[in-house]
Image (cartoon, rainbow, N blue to C red):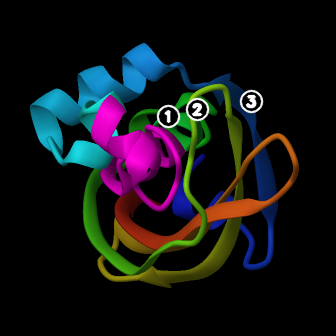
Amino acid sequence: MKLDEFAIGQEFKTKSIQLTKETIMEFAREFDPQYMHVDEEKAKQGRFNGIIASGIHTLAISFKLWIEEGKHGEDIIAGTEMNQIKFLKPVFPGNELYTIVKVLDKKENRSQTGILTVLLSTYNEKDEKVFEGELSVLIRR
């Protein structure tokens, strides 16, 4: 979809994805190697009583689910900004996540492009919000 095809307030629901302990630990070993993501014994003694996903992993999954919806298609040019990033609840192995994407704003900036801003709200299988963040992209009109 091009910028002009999106409407402020429009919402999209993505498919869901289930996280495993292995995928959580694999991501964390490379990008966020803190004990609560990679060390089962230490994590069991911590606040969450076990391994949790990195917030960065949750953000990346939220973004992936949105992009896989294909709404931008090849009309997207580049990401421009992320704001109001909030990690609201821990994500555990076995959680199944999906994202609701709400169009917050759209602005024309040149004759052929504009900026689209959406709110990504990611939920687990219990419909508990685990992540929220605004994403802006440069997109064709």
Circle 1: element type: helix
Q: Which residue is mark 1?
A: 73
**Residue 15 shows which numbered tag?**
3
The overriding secondary structure of the stretch rendered in magenta is helix
Question: Which amino acid type is marked by label 3?
Answer: Lys
Circle 2: element type: loop
Q: Is residue 58 above or below residue 105?
A: above
Q: Residues within 10 Å of mark 2 (few under 14, many from 20)?
A: few
Residue visible at 12% across and 30% down?
30
Residue 53 visible in this rendered orientation of the protein:
no
Q: CA distance from mark 3 to mark 2?
A: 12 Å
Q: CA distance from mark 1 to mark 2?
A: 5 Å
Question: Which amino acid type is marked by label 1?
Answer: Gly
Q: Are marks 1 and 2 in contact (CB under 8 Å)?
A: yes
Tag in front: 3 or 2: 3
**Residue 27 shows which numbered tag?**
none
Q: Residues within 10 Å of mark 1 (few under 14, many from 20)?
A: few
Circle 3: element type: strand
Of residues 126 and 59, which is closer to you in this image? Answer: 126
Of residues 10 and 33, which is closer to you in this image? Answer: 33
**Residue 99 image offset from top left, x and y in percent:** 68, 49
> Is residue 64 shown in magenta?
no
Q: Which residue is mark 2?
A: 70
Q: Which of the two discs, 3 and 2, labels the residue nearer the N terminus?
A: 3
Label count reads 3
Left or right of 33: which side holds 12?
Answer: right
Q: Residues within 10 Å of mark 3 (few under 14, many from 20)?
A: some
Magenta-highlighted residues: 41-63
Q: CA distance from mark 3 to mark 1?
A: 17 Å
Tag in front: 3 or 1: 3
**Residue 68 image offset from top left, x and y in percent:** 55, 29
